[in-house]
Amino acid sequence: MDLYQLEYFLEAARQRSFTRAAAKLNLAQAALSEQMRKLEAGLGARLFNRGRRETTLTPAGETLRTHAEALLAQALATRRAVGDQVALRGGRLAVGAIPSVSACLLPAAVAAFRRKHPQVELALLEGTSEAVAQWVETGRIELGVVQLPAPGDAFQVTPLLDESFVLLVPKKHPLARRRLPRLSELAKEAFVFYKGRARDVAQAACRAAGFEPRTACESGELETIRSLVAADLGIALLPELAARDAVPGCAVVRLGGAPVRRSVALLQRKGQELSPGAQSFRRLLIGEAAA
């Protein structure tokens, strides 16, 4: 049973005549009759009472008419929805990112996307690199921004940025007046750690510098980290992106010696064709990261 057969069927039911229905559909009457015979054979039921002057529906035909009208209405709605998404007049796009990117890099890309495609619903999810990668792999989101390495080989990876870590310290802290202090000089400091892979990189760097960092507290919320540092509860070793904006009560200090670095990338599933909305957002985000 094809949609065009249902369209032919409904026209024949409306016209109560194969001759008139064929004329409306610009078909030969024989072609319309043949399609109706195929439809009846496929359904295993007679749909029409064929008379000399008028063709009427059988009980089975009346049942089909109700369902055919609903099916064709749904098909039309589906075509329109797909057309709207292709033309970016509607649809939904889900994107995920680690917190530092969500707070510091995504806002400009999101604002540009909303200006360009105001009718597309944009859903933003925030989580660890592992969680974001899992959401991409399972199809919950189309695009995800993570700190490398990406877990597994199920992804197409597009590098976005490579950045150094910096110190965020209270403004009155002696380090705020230091130029390029080395990480090895910070063994006696208390640290406020940013949960996730950023914390793992920071802790590994401290150990490589010869000491086990003392944890004052940790949080997965960037604003909480900034507030704790401003309150003089410790210093934070953060990706530069997370310390890009001015933070009241804090100073950003660049480290001397071997740099502590991380790479951030955009993930999508291998072999998956991105929706038009995802393609547009991808271009905007790559442009924002390069700016």
Image: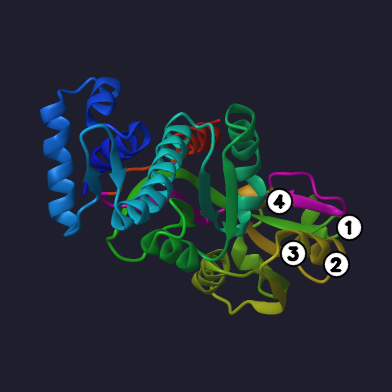
Looking at the rendering, the stretch of residues picked out in magenta corresponds to 244-271
Residue 194 percent location from the top left of the image: 65, 66
- In space, the residues marked 4 and 2 are separated at their CA atoms by 15 Å
**Foreground of the two, 153 or 260:** 153
Is label 4 in contact with label 1 (beta carbons under 8 Å)? no
Left/right placement of residue 239 relative to residue 155 reads right
- Residue at x 58% of width, y 34% of height: 113
Q: Mark 3: few, some, or many residues within 10 Å (few <14, many ≥20)?
A: many
Separation (CA) of disc 2 from disc 3? 11 Å
Q: Nearer the viewer, mark 3 or mark 4?
A: 3
Q: Which amino acid type is shown beneath numbered disc 1?
A: Lys
Q: Earlier in the sequence, mark 4 or mark 1?
A: 1
Taking the image as drawn, is residue 150 in sight?
A: no
Q: Is residue 50 above or below residue 103?
A: above
The residue that label 1 is drawn on is 172
- Report the front residue among 254 and 71: 71
Q: CA distance from mark 3 to mark 1?
A: 17 Å
Magenta-colored stretch includes residue 260: yes
Q: Are marks 2 and 1 in contact (CB under 8 Å)?
A: yes
> At which x and y percent is residue 43?
19, 57
Q: Which residue is mark 2?
A: 232
Label located before the other in sequence (2 or 1): 1
Mark 4–mark 2 contact, CB under 8 Å?
Answer: no
Q: CA distance from mark 2 to mark 1?
A: 9 Å
Tag 2, which secondary structure? Answer: loop
Name the residue tied to disc 4. 253
Residue under pointer 3: 225
